[in-house]
Each structure stands twice: as C-alpha cells, then as structure tokens.
Image (spheres, rainbow, N blue to C red):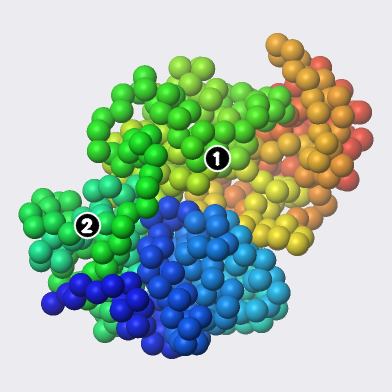
Amino acid sequence: MYQILSSDEAAGLISSGETICVNSFVGIENPVELHEAIGRRFHETGEPRDLTVISSAGLGVWDENRSAEGYIREGAVKKLICGHFGSMPSTKRIVLEDRFEAYNLPLGCISHAIRAQASGLPGALSKVGLDIFVDPRREGPGINGISKDDSLVKPVVVDGEEFLYYRLPPITTALIKGTAADRFGNISFDDMYMSGDALSICQAVKANRGKVIVQVDRLVTTPSRPRNTIIPGCLVDVIVLAEPEPRPVAFKALTGSFEIPYEEWKGWQEMIDDLSGARSKSFPAFNTIGRRAARELRAGDIVNIGIGIPETVSRYARKNGLLDKITMTVESGGIGGFPASGTVFGAMIGAASVYDMANQFDLYNSGGLNICFMGAFEIDRMGNVNAHRGPETFSGIGGFANITAKTPTVVFCLTFNTKGLEIERRKDEVTILKNGAVPKIVPAVHSVSFSAARALHNGQRVLYVTERCVFTLTQKGLTLTEVYPGVDLQKDILDLLPFEVPVELR
C-alpha cells in the first residue's frame, strides 16, 4: 500500500549507495521537487551519498541551480549514466573535471536495458553502438578519466552475429513525475508531454525489491480510465503531492488534451518557440541546407528530424506541401504531429500517439523510419560523423545512434565550416562571401557517433548536405556528388578540404 509523504520525507527514504533511475527527457517531465528535496537533505546531513543515477535522456531543466544539479555538484553522486547531458549545464562542466564517474550510452539502449531489468533479465542486446565510441573496442562509454566501469557495455556473439550487450546496475529507487494519483495509487499522465520509461522503471525497481516514489500535481478520487493509467497503484510505494510548476497556456498544446489540426500547427509552433527559447535568427546557410535536404522527403515517409540545422527541413517540407503527408516522430515516444524544440524538446504539437520510449526505439532500431535528418559537429574523409563530443565539451549521443543505425536514408545537415561563415543566396545561386574559421570536414573526427563502415555494411544511403555542396557516402568514403549553382568547385570546395575526395557530380 502506498504512502502519501512530503518531498522531504520521501527523500529521507533514500539510502546511501542506492541506484536511482529518473524518468525524464532532456528538460521535460523531471520530478524536480524530489530532486531538490534530496539536495536539501544532502546539504544538511551529507546523506544520501555514493549514489548511482541513471536517466535515459538526462535529468536537468536547463538551470544549474535547480533539479539534481545541486546535489550532483556537492558530491552526492559517485556514478552518472545518461544518454544526454545537454540540459544539465553545471553537470556537463564538472564531469570533465573527473569529479565522479560519468557514462554516455545511446538513449535507446539505456531504455531497453531498463526494460530488460523489468523482465528479470540483466541486460539487453543491440547492434546499436557497434563501431562507434561506446563500443569498448574503440573508446567505451566513459566520459572522463576515472570512468572505467567495463560492465556497462560488452561485445558478444550470438548465433554467429555480433552485438553489444548493455547492462545497468540493479535499479533500487524510481523517481517519477506524473499528473495525478487516484485513491488506489494509480498514476495517470494526462497533462504530461510523455511517459518515457516510467512503467519499465517501476517494474525494474520492483524486480529488484526497491521503492517507487512518484511526484504528482494532484490527488483525485475518481479513478482514471484503465488505459490512461501509466503506473498501476500496486507498483507505487510513495506519492508526493507537489504544486505544479506554472506553464504558459500555449504549452497545453503539447499535452494532447485537444485536437490541433494541421492548419494550426504553425501558429502553435511559433507561440511555443517564443516561450521555449527555440526561435532563432534565420541564417541563409541554414536555410539553404534545409531547402536542399527537404528534397529527399517523399509522401508517406516516417521521419525523425534532429534539433539545430535539421529543424529547417520541416520549414521547407511545409513549403513543398509535404509536411502533412509525412509522419514525424520524436525519441520520447511521439508519433505524428510536429516536434517542439528549445526547452520543451521531446514534446509534440498535435501528436497522433504518444507511447512508451522503449517502443519508439524498437521502431528506430529495426529500421522503421524511412529517413532521418541529423546534425553533425564534424565529418571525416571516410564519412564518419561526430555529433556528440567536441575537444573540450560534450552533449552526449542521445537518440542519435539509434536513429541512424538502421534508417535506410540518413541525411546529415551541417555547414562546410563555421565561426564566421557568411553566404548569400539569390534564387538558386549561392555565393560564399566569407568562410568560417573552423572546418567541419576534417581528416579524422575526434569521436565516432556514426560509423560509415557500418552504414555501408547495412546498405544505407547516406548524404551530407552543406550550404554549398552535397557529399554522398560511397565505398571510397566521402564523395562529392553535387555542387550548387554559383559555387566555385575548386575555390569554394576542393581547395578548402584537408584531403582529396572523389568527384562524381550527378
């Protein structure tokens, strides 16, 4: 039978050395009050300490003074395992100072490893991650110099096929955010943007004889409809009632509580972008990339579009009359509708369906997408891509590795160089006014997020779309296949490359 406790009382139930799993997605649907109660307790008593914290997609709220950032920074955590670190600004910094162990695994592989624990299995097999940084035969998942745990990812062979085996420490405490708890302890997510890994986390904790703590906005007497209950009350140990954080009215469009016709997507998107910090200036280079990349879309495609430059693809899909003829997806579990961005990345406007995150990654891992559009920090002569880590910073791989692992057509969207790049586009002609100081096409990437050799083995079609040209992955590696009108092949492309590339213009 569940208890109703305050957040401080709930935090008092967590012992030192426990493994906590948090249901959140980058910056959304994080049980912030529970985190801050843990932080208060640790600051006052030094307990709980030596925590292992797991989150498929990260557990920050873009503010280093809120959520888990405080107790992580003060030293309560000995090990952090996440798919993405982008919404945790201070955590990102101190990870690189070797303050605690930190590991970056593909988001979908963490999600599936949690689900494996829920079914009584120690881990999950996946082909995702082979030949990229997380493969222990390359770098392994450790982010800093003290992260040496070799039990998280292992290469194995089953029936003659090579896989990676992802194994998480046994989860003993669940921290979940829900909308409401009824009198039986059943938890609904009606006002939430997603359910993420919530059910799998709770089942895994129960398999390990641990405790499930759920923060909710309200208590209700009337039970939810059975299909709307995400976590049944029999799995819940503690319910914490916390005042819901105020949300702009426009954000109700992300809860799926009312229908949003396609004709209204754009208006809602603009309102939400203004509120979430997603709206950015229109850059000619980005627009040129988006316009060219959008030509790869076909009616009926199931699609994932990454954040950053790839988001311009949706603008041109709308202009081309294709946006309502494709099915957009987002890693958190949304299908259909239009993905939100900024601080509410992971939510969708007008989604047709929002299901558990592990199911979404079943779709991605099996090649269920037709096409995806991803960003990139850098690419090399062989066509390998680094999208998760720079020389002195990192964001994490997130769902990138799962999305690109088997999708038939992968389109990378990036500028040829950066830091000062200026171009002009008039009609179909592009003029390079000034090149950026930092090249994006390099002899060898710092870390591999996408393996060109694995993509060729899988028979995937891979394009690298820039503001001046398009490269295609071939058996020769990076091959120049398209130069835009107005661009000088020699001066604007070949002279700037640090290596020779085959030129096979189509």
The residue positioned 31% from the left and 28% from the top of the image is 260
Q: On screen, 72 above or below 420?
A: below
Q: How many marks?
A: 2
Instruction: Give the label, 1 or 2, closer to the camera.
Output: 2
Q: Earlier in the sequence, mark 1 or mark 2?
A: 2
Place of residue 471 in the rendered image (x, y in percent of width and height, measured from the top left): 72, 35
Mark 2 lies on residue: 218
On the picture, is 309 further left or further right than 166?
A: right
Mark 1 lies on residue: 277
- Residue found at the very far front of the displayed protein: 44
The three-letter amino acid code for the residue at tag 1 is Gly
Label 1, label 2: how far apart the Cα atoms are: 28 Å
The residue positioned 7% from the left and 54% from the top of the image is 222
The three-letter amino acid code for the residue at tag 2 is Arg
The tag on residue 410 is none
On the picture, is 286 further left or further right than 270?
A: right
The residue positioned 57% from the left and 33% from the top of the image is 279
| Quadrant of the drawing holding the N terminus | bottom left
- Residue found at the very far top of the displayed protein: 427
Place of residue 343 in the rendered image (x, y in percent of width and height, measured from the top left): 50, 46
On the picture, is 15 further left or further right than 470?
A: left
Place of residue 269 in the rendered image (x, y in percent of width and height, measured from the top left): 45, 30
Q: Name the secondary structure under disc 2.
A: strand
Q: Name the secondary structure under disc 1.
A: loop
| Quadrant of the drawing holding the C terminus | top right
Q: On screen, 329 above or below 88?
A: above
